[in-house]
Amino acid sequence: MVQTGAKPMRDKALSFFGLGYVGLTSAVCFASRGFNVIGFDTDPQKIELINSGKAPFYEPQVEELLREARRRGQLSFTDNPEEAVKGSDTTFITVGTPSNPDGSINLEQVKNASKQIGQALKGKNGYHLVVVRSTVTPGTTENIVKPIIESCSRKKCGESWGLCFSPEFLREGSAVNDTFHPDRIIIGELDRTSGEILEELYRTFYSSEMPKTIRTTPVNAELVKYANNAFLAMKVSFINMIANLCQKLPGADVEVIAEGIGLDKRIGPLFLKAGAGWGGSCFRKDLDALLDFALKNSVELPLVEAALKVNNTQPYRMIELAKGLIGELKGKKVSVLGLAFKPETDDMRDAVSIKIVKRLLEEGARVAVYDPKAMENARKAFGEAVEYAESVEDCLTGSECALIVTEWEEFRKMTPQNFIELMKIPAVVDGRRIYNAESFSPKLRFAAVGLGEKRYYNQH
Ligand SMILES: NC(=O)c1ccc[n+]([C@@H]2O[C@H](COP(=O)([O-])OP(=O)(O)OC[C@H]3O[C@@H](n4cnc5c(N)ncnc54)[C@H](O)[C@@H]3O)[C@@H](O)[C@H]2O)c1
């Protein structure tokens, strides 16, 4: 039982510090289930945009939920951190934790948010729970967040305020669905009461669908998040490593290998999709932060290093395959289909498309790019160096090679005939294994990551 005399949960108000992919998605989801939510961000333009009913990024369902919750008066936004804390009982810290140039974690946003929360708590009556949701290295909640809030509020943790770390596992592209249906909840609590309040809050939110919940120490909860991302990255890098071997073996196909090993229950089929490598805002920065953290504790993590090593060169396999199809790229129009780091997002942070486009330009290719959602971010990344197409057709017209970099649904629907009709030379490199090699190979110049040389393919 919660011992704070807390009101029934749904009367409780929540605040979110940081309205990026995680903070805004969580805010709209909690508001949609009847919580009163107040969002704060240090970026005034973001607040203004969100207040006008628009999400500052593309993520399925977020904008609809945002508008609905605002219409019901359940969701508001402020540029005043004190107002956010005083108007709520629980504050989630969902600010960014980017990398420093040396790969170590940059905790400046977490420290600033902790200061703002601490200062606001100084003049607040009643119990307040602070939940760190940003990904932070082990020990951060207890050794950095707690002392900052204690010193700014002049209140001891565990008395009038409590502190937990609870990692976020949502995936961009399915963030709303993941928020409503997570595989598990992890609560790292500094004291029992704060853990109980947070568990009850989740129970109210998930109701009969409460996921398996692990209550533990903050340091365990912090490490679970890193170990989770490191394992997933390792799994993808593993299959990409095997894909690179398959590439050299006539008749081999990594998809069959993935299916074969994925049926082993100890391995499982997910995250065994070979391709151009993983990107996104989390894997690289989290693996770098984990390596740096381990090193500071005199521990080496060779499997994590290997996962990064495989991924560093994986995007360039696309260039090798393109050259195998059409020879030198200099002066040729090459079309890049897909720029976001995965489908159903406009996020291009650390996207493999950036590496691929850069290398194509170095090789002297004329690069045309297209993505259904990420064109605005692409303009920031590539400036005047590439041609921005209005559609797939526009991107492919007159092209001598097409690289599939992100597996958008729109690209999956393309037939060999579509490429033949539009391109000067119909050559396709499938970096996400979205096409059926048997139907594509005989009709056009076709190569795919992890597919042994095509001239042998049909002899099987
Ligand atoms: N994006 C993901 O898929 C994902 C998934 C799981 C976990 N995470 C983790 O969640 C955290 C947030 O990730 P994100 O992708 O939403 O980041 P983001 O960069 O999209 O958003 C962070 C937001 O915090 C704001 N901010 C910075 N300092 C602030 C302060 N003091 N007070 C209030 N707002 C402040 C920024 O202006 C920005 O809007 C990171 O630690 C990340 O590793 C992200």
Image (cartoon, rainbow, N blue to C red):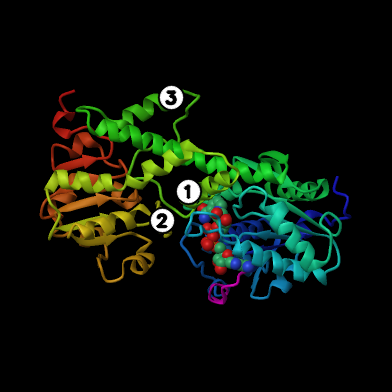
In the image, which is nearer the foreground, mark 2 or mark 3? Answer: 2
Ligand 1 within 8 angstroms of badge 1 C-beta? no
Residue nearer the viewer, 255 or 65: 255
Residue 230 can be seen, yes or no:
yes
At 45% from the left and 23% from the top, the residue drawn is 264
Is residue 124 covered in magenta?
A: no
Kind of residue at disc 2: Asp
What's the distance in space between the residues labelled 2 and 3, CA to CA? 31 Å
Q: Mark 2 — residue?
A: 350
As drawn, 257 above or below 325: above
Q: Are marks 1 and 3 in contact (CB under 8 Å)?
A: no
Residue nearer the viewer, 270 or 277: 277
Q: Within the displayed image, which quadrant is ligand 1 positioned in?
A: bottom right
Q: Mark 3 — residue?
A: 263
As helix, strand or loop, the secondary structure at mark 2 comes to loop
Q: Position of residue 142 (x, y in %)?
A: 72, 52
Question: Which quadrant is home to the N terminus?
Answer: top right
**Which mark is first along the chain, 3 or 2?**
3
Q: Which mark is residue 283?
A: 1
What's the distance in space between the residues labelled 1 and 3, CA to CA? 25 Å
